[in-house]
Image (tube, rainbow, N blue to C red):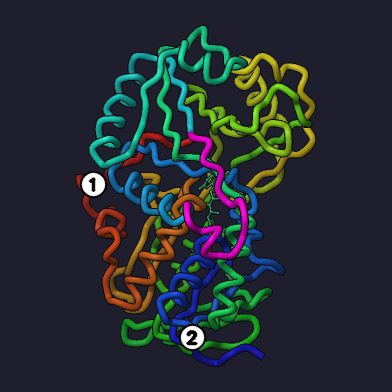
Amino acid sequence: MIKVSSDVVIIGGGIVGISIAYHLAKKGCSNVIVLEKERLIGSGSTSKGAGGIRQQFSSEINIRLSMESVKIFEQLADELGCKDLFYQNGYLFLLSTEEEMESFKKNVILQRDMGLEVDILSPDDVKSMIPFVNTDDLLGATFCGTDGYADTDGVLQGFAREAKRLGVEIYLQTEVEGIEVKNGKVCRIKTGRGDIETHMLVNAAGPYSAIIGKMAGIDLPVRPFRRQIFITEPMSFIPDSMPMVIDFHTRFYCRKESGGLLMGGGEKKELSSFDTNVDWDSLEILAEKGIHRIPAIKDAKIKRGWAGLYSITPDFNPILGRVPRVEGFICAVGFSGHGFMHSPVTGKLISELIIDGEASTIDLSPLSINRFEDKDKIVPEQNVI
Ligand SMILES: Cc1cc2nc3c(=O)[nH]c(=O)nc-3n(C[C@H](O)[C@H](O)[C@H](O)COP(=O)(O)OP(=O)(O)OC[C@H]3O[C@@H](n4cnc5c(N)ncnc54)[C@H](O)[C@@H]3O)c2cc1C
C-alpha cells in the first residue's frame, strides 16, 4: 500500500530527486515521498554518467552551483558514513585554437574572481603533467585541482539510505500517470498504484521531465539527447592520479576507470530521442579523436559501452524553481551533462525553497523558467561537453 497523502512528492528517483529528498529530510521535512517508475533508483541517466565534477564553467551561475556542490562533496563521505566517494584529481581542459585560448582565459578571470584556483598551462606543462598526451597541436590548457570525479552510485545510495533513515519513503515501480491541478494549485498525483494528495510536487524526472510538465499543462523546454561512454581494458601506463582530460576542440574526454580509460564525448550530432541503444559506429569516431590525443590507446580493447540521456534546455542550464500559473509545482530539470555534479547543491536549494519559501545559498532567478520569455536574459553555457 502506498500513502494517500504527503507534504512533498518528488517525481524521479535519480540523483537529483534523491538528493532533494535527503536535503528536505535533513532540514526537518521528512513527510516526503519519492516516486520512481523503474525497479531501482538511479536507473535513468544517473547510472550512465561519468561521475565528473568540475567548477570550470563559463557562466557565473554554473561556477557557483559547482563551487557550492564541491563544498558538499568534500565532506560527503563523512556525512553519509561512507569512504572514498570523491577523487579530487582535477580537470584538465586542452585547448587547440586561439579562440579557445581567449575564451578560456576570460573564464579563468571570472573563476578566479569568484575564488576558484585555476591554472593556465603551456603545452610543456601538460606534457610534464601527463606524458602520454600528444601536445603537438595544443596552444595551452587550464587546470583546476579541486575538480575531479566521484562514485555516482555511492553518492546516490548514501543519500537514499540517509533519506530513508530520516523518514522519506521511496516507492519503486510506481509510475506517475497524471497530475491534478485545481484552481491553479497542484492537488493530486495519479500513479499506477493509487493517488497521492499533495500541494507540493518536485519534477525531477530527468529526460522525461517535459512529459511530467505536460501532465500539469506546463510546457518545459527540456529535450532528451543520447550520449555514450566506452571503457577500455586496463592499461599499465595510466596513473591513479590522472585528472579528467577534456580535449575541448573535439569534446573527447577520458579519465581512469578500473585500470583502463573511461572515454566519451566527441560524438556525431543527433536528433533528440529517448534512444539508449549503443551506437557502435560512434565508437569509431570517438576512437579516432582519442588516438590522436593519446596515441598509446591505439591497441586498447573496449570491454564495455553504454548509452544514456542528457536532458537539454535551450541554454544548457537547468530550470530550478517554481513555475508560473501552477502553484506547488517545482522544477529541478534540464541539467545537460552536469546533473550529478550539481545534485548536492540542487538538493540544498530546493529544500530551502520548499521549507523557507526562498533559496538562500544561491539566487535562483537566473535559472527560472521565466528566462526563456526574454531572450536577453539567456546566458548560454559555453563549456558544454
Ligand atoms: C553518457 C553520460 C555522461 C554523463 N557524465 C556526467 C558527468 O560526468 N558529470 C555530471 O555531473 N553529469 C553527467 N551526466 C549527466 C547526469 O548523469 C544527469 O544530469 C543526472 O543523472 C540527472 O539526474 P536526474 O535525477 O535528473 O535524472 P535521472 O537519473 O534520469 O532520474 C530521473 C528518474 O525519473 C524517473 N521517471 C521518469 N518519469 C517518471 C514517471 N512518470 N514516474 C516515475 N518516475 C519517473 C526515471 O525512471 C528516472 O529514474 C552524464 C550523462 C550521460 C548520459
Residue stretch in magenta: 74-90
Callout 2: 10 Å neighbours few (<14), some, many (20+)?
Answer: some
Residue displayed at 60% across by 20% down:
289
Residue 127, compared with residue 51, is above or below; it is above
Q: Amino acid at mark 1?
A: Lys
Q: Residue at x 55, y 48 (%)?
A: 86
Number of other residues with Cα within 10 Å of mark 1, as a class: few under 14, some 14 to 19, many 20 or more = few
Q: Looking at the image, can residue 268 be seen?
A: no
Residue on which disc 2 sits: 31
Residue 14 sits in which quadrant? bottom right
Counting from the top left corner in percent of width and height, residue 142 is at 40, 25
Residue at image location 25% in from the left, 59% down from the top: 363
Q: Is residue 221 above or below residue 327?
A: above
Residue 105 in sight: yes
Q: Which residue is mark 1?
A: 375
Q: Amino acid at mark 2?
A: Asn
Give the image location of residue 336, x and y in percent. 47, 47
The residue positioned farthest toward the top in the image shown: 136
Considering only order in the chain, which callout, 1 or 2, is on the residue closer to the N terminus?
2
| 162 up-or-down from 231: above or below | below
**Is residue 246 highlighted in magenta?**
no
